[in-house]
Image: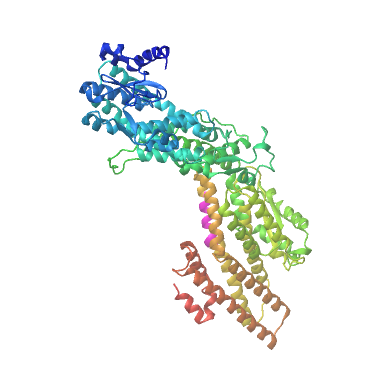
Amino acid sequence: MDSEEAENVAPRVRFRLGKAEDNAPKEDATEPSADVKEPTEDGSTAGPARFKRKLGSWIFESVGGFYMPTEDISKLPVRRQEHLLIRDLIYAFSGVPSSHIRPEIPYKEISQLRTDQVDKVRFKIDESFSGAFRSLANELLPLIGYYINVQSFIEDTIMTTGCARTLGIALHKSMQQYFELQAGLETQLQERKLDLQQLVHQLRPWLKIMQALASLTSRVRRSELNSAQLLSLMDEHQAHFKCEQLKLILSDVSHYYMKMVQLWTQKGVLYDVRREFFVEDTSASDMSSTLLSPKQCCHAYWAQRYRLHMERLPSFLAAHAERIFLAGKYLNVLRQCNVQMKLMQASLTYVPQVEREGAAKVEGEMEVEPAHVALIRSSYELPARKLIELLVKEQQLLQHLNNLQDYFLLKRLELVEAVLDNCADQLQCNVDSLKPEKLQQIMLQLLQQSTDPHKHLLRSQLMDCDVATQLARRLKRLTKLKPEQHADQEQSSEAEASSETESSRLPAQLALSGYEAFTLRYEPKWPISLVIHEDAVEQLQLLHRVLFYLHYVLRQMGATPKHSARADALLERMTECIRQLEQHMTRDIVQPRWQTLLESAQKAQFVDELLEQFQDTLDQCQLLCLFSEPATFVRAIHTLGQLCLNYSSFMERQGSGPDFEAGVAEYEQELNSLLIGILDLLIELARPNSASGHLERESCKQLLQRLEHVSQDLGDSSASSENSF
C-alpha cells in the first residue's frame, strides 16, 4: 500500500470508530498507517493481506479488504465494555457483522448452509468481555440466526409469485415494528440512556416472536404448498406458539383467500385467477349472461356443475366447507330462477380466535361464534331461506309431494283401478309386444277427469327389467358413486358407460309381463326438479312397481271364482298374505313417514332441511318396505305373486274332482314353503343381534305380526317365529 492509499484509510477508520475516537490518545494519530509493513524476526516484512498492529488499546484488523479497528477489551473499563457490547448486539440483531460476536463455525461453512439451517448456527461473544455481561447477553444470541432466516426468506420471496410472496410481504410488514425497536435502541445508546439489562428486557419478547417466525419460514421452505396448505400450516403454527404477531400475519396472508370466499358466498361469483379456490366451475366456459334453457337447468346439471377440491381448503374453514359451497351454489340457482334479492355486502376476514389460558369455561356459558363463521352462516342462510320460500310458496312443492304419494305410493287407488280396468288385456301381454305410446294415450284420457293442476307431469313407462334387476343396478351404481361424490366428470361418465353396457346385455326377448314392467314417471319443471329429480323418481318407481304388482295380484285373486271349501280357504290365505304385504308398506311404512315429510316441508327454514328430509323419507321407505336384503325379499314377493296368479288361473280352468284337489294340495304345499322362507328372512332380520338397524327390526316385527294369521297353519315354523324375539 503506497502513501496515497494510506491517507485514504484514516478517514475510513475514523468513520468506523464513531464517538469512540474521541477517547483515543491523540498521539496515536501520528503513528504509522495500518498498512505499513513491520519487519519480522528474519528481517522480512509481513504481507498486507492479513496482519495486526497494536496501537494502545486498538487493534487494526483487515476484514473483507477493509481495515477495521477493534479494541483490546481487557484494557477497557467496565462501562466502556458494556457500551461496546450493546452496540455490537444491536448491529448483530440487524444482520450486520460484528467484530466481537462471531459464529461457532467458520464463515466459509456458513456460506455453504441452506437458508433454513442458519437459525441453528450458535453465536458466541468475545470472552474478553466481562462474564456477567456475556451471561446476560447470551440469552438473546439466538435472535441473530432467527433474524437472518426470516429476512432471507423475505428477500427470496418478495419478488416471486404465488402464496410465498404473500407471506413474504406480510413478514416484511410485520418486521417494521422490529426495525423501529432497533432504531430506538440505537438512539438510546447514542444518548447514553441504554444499559445491557434494559436491552435484554426490551428484546426478550421478540426472542419468542422471531423464533416463531423463523420456524414458520423454515417449514415453508421445506415444502411446496398451495395457498390453502400454507394457511393451514400457519394456523397450526400460530396455535402452537400462541403468538399475537403470527395471528396478525395469518390474518394478512389469508386476506386473498377470504376475499374469494366472500365473493362466492355473497355474490355467487368465482374469482380464482390462480386456481387455488376449492370450488371449481366445470361449466364456466359454457356459461353466458343469459339464463339456461329449462332442459339444461335440472338437478343433474347442478349436481355436476361444480367440482370440489378439498385439498385447496384451509383447515380453519374445513368445518364450514358445505355451507360455503352451498351458499354460492344456491345464489346461482336463484339467479337461474330469475329471482331478484338484495345480496350481502360484508367484508370477510379471518382472525384466529384468542384462547383464554387457564380460564375454565363457566357452565351454561355460550361460546362466542367467530366473526368469519357468523358471516359464512349468514351468507348461507340468505339464499337457502329464499330458495325454500320459492319452492314451497311460489312453486307449490307440497302439492307435488302429495302427488308422489297419491300416484306412486298408492294413497289414492282411483288411478290404479282405472289403469287396471282400461289396460287389463295389455298388461297381461309380454312387454315387448306393448306400445308405450298407446299406454300413454290411455293414461292421458284417464287423467282428463282429474282436478290435479300438475297432472300433465305424469307419464307411463315400461321398464326393461324386473324390480330385482333394477334394484341391483341402482345399488351397484350408488356403491361406485358414493366414495366419489365429488369426483371428476370423467369418472362419472365411465360409470354411466358401464351402466349402458349392462343395459345392452339384456336378452332380445324379455320374459316380462306388462304388469311387471309398468310404472309411472313424474317430470316436474324447474325449479321443482331440483328436489324431485331423476334419482328420487327412480326410488319411487321401485316402490311403485312392487305395490302395483301386489295390487294387480290382489285384484286378480278377488276376481277368481269360488270352488270347494279347501280351495277357497287357500285362496283366502293367499289373498290375505298379499293384502297384508301391501298394507304393511302403504300404512305402516309410507303413510306416517310421508306425513312427517309434509309437516317438515312446511316448517323448514332452509332448503337443505327439506332436501335432507325428503331423501331420508325415500331411503327409509325403500329400506323398511324392501329391507336390507332387497333383492332376496323382492324375488320372494314376486315368486309369491306368481304362485297366486297361477293358482287363480288353475281355479278358473279346473272344475272339481280328484285332480283338482290334488292340485290344490300341491299349491298349498308351495305356499307354505314360500311363507316359511319369507318368515325365516324376517325373523333373521328382526333378531336383536342382527346387522339391521332399529327401524328395520321394528318393521320386520310389524310384518311378522301381520302375517301371523296367515302362518298359523305352518305349525312348528310359526311357533318358532313367535318365540324368536
Q: Nearer the viewer, residue 458 or 103?
A: 103
Above or below, comparing residue 348 to residue 61 in the picture: below
Residue under the point 70% across and 65% down: 515
| Magenta stretch bounds | 587-598
Residue drawn 66% across and 53% down? 494
360 or 526: nearer the viewer: 360
Q: Position of residue 55 (x, y in %)?
A: 28, 18
Judge left or right: residue 613 versus residue 661.
Answer: left
- Place of residue 506 in the rendered image (x, y in percent of width and height, measured from the top left): 73, 64
- When the figure is inspected, residue 378 is found, relative to residue 174, above or below; the finding is below
Report the residue at 23% width, 22% height from top.
76
The quarter of the image holding the C terminus is: bottom left
Most foreground residue, 270 or 69: 69
Q: Main secondary structure of the magenta part?
A: helix
Residue 591 in the magenta stretch? The answer is: yes
Residue 662 forms part of the magenta stretch: no
Residue 546, position in %: x, y? 63, 64
User: Residue 178, percent across and down?
Assistant: 36, 25
Q: How is the image coloured?
A: rainbow
